[in-house]
Amino acid sequence: MSFIFVAQLFAIFAFATCGGYSGQLRISVDCMEKASSNLSIGIDFAYPFRLYQVSFEAPACEGMRRERVFLIGDYSSSAEFFVTIAVFAFLYSLIATIRNHNSRHEADFVVTVVFSFMWLVSSSAWAKALSDVKVATDPDEVQLLISACKDQTNKCGSVHGSRWSGLNTSVVGLKNWCPRRVG
Ligand SMILES: *[C@@H]1O[C@H](CO)[C@@H](O)[C@H](O)[C@H]1NC(C)=O
Ligand SMILES: *[C@@H]1O[C@H](CO)[C@@H](O)[C@H](O)[C@H]1NC(C)=O
């Protein structure tokens, strides 16, 4: 496999999974006082996963009062680092495609080594951030942030969690791919 091919695959993967990701979880808050319940609260989040900026309104289960709740955490540095490396890999691969292939092999080799290293660092940082994002957006964890849910007389539940299939691939796939220089 040539470096150019791998770099392009990496870039497409990173955009399709991390950079392009948006997810939604949905929870229910069933107050003892039924009228104030909301059985379907949707919470949307997306790249770059600055979760502390993501908020939603939950019933306070006291009359019609509601409270604004914020998710916890900021995973943007790992996510942006991962996508930035992908952007550079993609740009470099474009330049390499249009350039004379017989020249500057030394430079190609150095760039490939640097990218391989950055790739490992960025994908492992992102793998760690991703597992934290999964916990922070787990409906069971999010319920703990809602005051009304701390009161046993109200019932809180998870309607659905976020779908992670695309993101799993981004991390799993990267572990198996390292850029290799051919020719
Ligand atoms: C429940 O919460 C959603 C926001 O996720 C809101 O759009 C909807 O109007 C709320 N429903 C009630 C009955 O308050
Ligand atoms: C994604 O990973 C989680 C654990 O982190 C696992 O429970 C889930 O089944 C995986 N999904 C896919 C589609 O592989």
Image (spheres, rainbow, N blue to C red):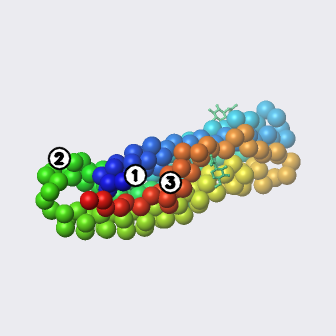
Question: What type is the residue that disc 1 sits on?
Answer: Phe
Q: Which residue is mark 1?
A: 10
Q: Secondary structure at mark 2?
A: helix
Q: Is residue 135 left or right of residue 110?
A: right
Which quadrant of the figure contains the N terminus? bottom left
Judging by the rendered image, the residue that carries numbered circle 3 is 173
Work out how far the residue at label 3 is from the one at label 1, CA to CA, in angstroms: 9 Å
Question: Is residue 118 placed above or below 164 in the rendered structure?
Answer: below
Q: Tell me what residue is drawn at x 77 percent, y 44 percent.
A: 157
x, y (%) of residue 53?
A: 50, 51
Crowding around mark 2 (Cα neighbors within 10 Å: few <14, some 14 to 19, many 20+) is few
Q: Quadrant of the C terminus?
A: bottom left
Q: List the residue tagged with mark 2.
A: 98
The quarter of the rendering in which ligand 1 is drawn is top right
For marks 1 and 2 on the same chain, the one whose residue lies earlier in the sequence: 1
Ranked by sequence position, the earlier of labels 3 and 1 is: 1
Query: Mark 3 or mark 2, which is nearer the start of the sequence?
Result: 2
Tell me the distance, in whole angstroms, between the alpha carbons under discs 1 and 2.
19 Å
